Image (cartoon, rainbow, N blue to C red):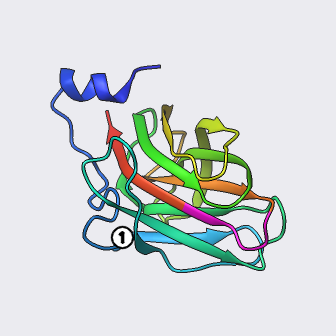
Amino acid sequence: MADIRRLVTLKDIKNEVSNTGGEADASGWTAAAGAGSAGAPVQVTANRPGSTGTKAVQTTGATVTANAGIQLLAEAASKPVSPGQRVFGYGHGRGTTAATFLDLRISFYDSASVLISHASVQVVVPTTNTWYELQGSATAPANSAFCSLNLLQTNTSTSPVLQADDFMLVID
């Protein structure tokens, strides 16, 4: 797997995520829950070690069924992609409540913005309140027209809290 940071130095690339980590606000981000609800993404002070900024994007779940999960999506289903194209994802994630895993995923959609599939590019078993650097790549499947980058947290709490920072989506 190519390290996206090395790719950045070797090739002229464009990060497809316009609001990478909420430094100005939480615009362009959406949230969802597997069962229950996820609050609208908000900008929070995060002070992630190694970050040049001080803000992140956060969602808080309400009455979320255990292990159903909540997720943050960076500009859902809005980045054009063609079948067979390689897509690289990078970002930092943190659960501030107990979680069973954090999953950085690239989601692929058809021309009607209907979900085709999620590609889990890196999954970690997190420690509460610890930031994780996540990265990986996936190849766009048949019928792909759009893609997006998202972070999923499965929860052990009915009110999970999920934060994302410094997201990058690169389409090769």
Check the image and report above or below for 156 versus 12. below
Q: Residue at (37%, 56%) from the top-left corner?
A: 47
Q: Residue at (36%, 72%) from the top-left corner?
A: 26
Task: Determine crowd level at label 1: few under 14, some 14-19, many 20+ residues with C-alpha closer than 10 A.
Answer: some
Q: Secondary structure at mark 1?
A: loop
Q: Quadrant of the C terminus?
A: top left
Q: Residue at (36%, 70%) from the top-left corner?
A: 28
Q: Position of residue 40 (x, y in %)?
A: 51, 80
The foreground one among 144 and 163 is: 163
Residues in magenta, as a range: 157-162
Q: Position of residue 11 (x, y in %)?
A: 19, 25
Query: Which residue in the protein does label 1 denote?
Result: 28
Tell me which secondary structure the magenta stretch mostly adopts.
loop
Q: Residue at (61%, 71%) from the top-left corner?
A: 32
The foreground one among 98 and 140 is: 98
Describe residue 113's horizontal placement relative to residue 153 as left or right. left
Is any part of residue 76 visible from this angle?
A: no
Give the residue furthest to the left.
12
Residue 170 position by quadrant = top left
Q: Amino acid at mark 1?
A: Gly
Q: Position of residue 106 (x, y in %)?
A: 51, 46
Describe residue 8's horizontal placement relative to residue 2 as left or right. left
The foreground one among 38 and 84 is: 38
Describe residue 28's horizontal placement relative to residue 102 as left or right. left
- Count of numbered tags: 1
Is any part of residue 157 visible from this angle?
A: yes
Q: Position of residue 6 (x, y in %)?
A: 29, 22
Check the image and report above or below for 149 versus 59. above
